[in-house]
Amino acid sequence: MPDLKEQLRADLTTAMKARDELRTATLRMVLSAVSAEEVAGKAARVLSDDDVQAVLRREAKKRREAAEAFGAAGRTEQAEREQAEGEVLAGYLPAQLEDADLAALVADVVTRTGASGMKDMGKVMGAVQGAVAGRADGGRVAAEVRRQLG
């Protein structure tokens, strides 16, 4: 069984023993999403650590978007809860790239691919997403690619 999934289970047990309601609920939710992903499709499978990280990124993005929506609707208590859950999930994800590092990575890919304008954005995005590997949100990457190609 993948190490990250085992780590999540061990941390859930620890959180339950410590009576940490937020962490317990968040880890249960993530493990439920991982289990759902394992049985999705035609055949059940065991997720690799990369697949588990993809589920974690997806769930963290949901929390970010929900926090923004609750905040815009004036429901600060729910927004704070979503942000707190997002922070718990962030502890299991790789560190995010700084803006300068992302800009340098995009500049390198633009140079390597010979991209000259917005018509080459798809080619650049594909190469950058492979190099970034979950260390930056897709929206941030797209904005930087647009900035450099525009």
Image: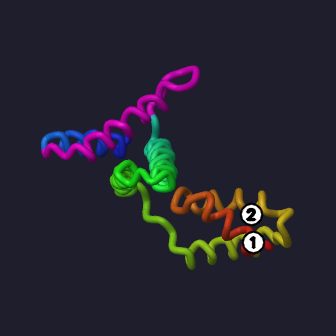
Work out how far the residue at label 1 is from the one at label 2, CA to CA, in angstroms.
Answer: 6 Å
Q: Report the side of 102 relative to 20 (left or right).
A: right
Q: Element type at marker 1?
A: helix
Q: Residues within 10 Å of mark 2 (few under 14, many from 20)?
A: many
Contact (Cβ within 8 Å) of mark 1 with mark 2: yes
Q: Position of residue 64 (x, y in %)?
A: 48, 53
Residue 87 circle label: none
Residue drawn at (44%, 32%) of the image: 46
Is residue 56 rendered to the left or right of residue 127? left
- Answer with the quarter of the image where residue 143 lies: bottom right
**Residues packed near mark 1 inside 10 Å, few (<14), some (14 to 19) or many (20 plus):** many
Main SS class of the magenta portion in the image: helix
Q: Residue at x 43, y 64 (%)?
A: 95
Colour scheme of this structure image?
A: rainbow
Quarter of the picture containing the C terminus is: bottom right
Give the amino acid at mark 2: Val
Q: Nearer the viewer, residue 149 or 50?
A: 149
In the displayed structure image, the side of residue 1 where residue 73 appears, left or right: right
Query: Mark 1 = which residue?
Result: 110
Residue 21 screen position, x and y as percent: 22, 43
* SS for callout 2: helix
Region of the chain picked out in magenta, as a range: 18-46
Q: Quadrant location of the N terminus?
A: top left
The answer to whether residue 50 is visible is no
Residue sitting nearer the eye, 73 or 117: 73
- The residue lying at 69 percent from left, 60 percent from top is 127
Say above or below: 148 vs 52. below
Q: Is residue 75 above or below residue 38?
A: below
Residue 28 on the magenta span:
yes
Q: Position of residue 55 (x, y in %)?
A: 48, 43
Which residue is label 2 attached to? 124
Task: Choose the circle earlier in sequence order: 1 or 2.
Answer: 1
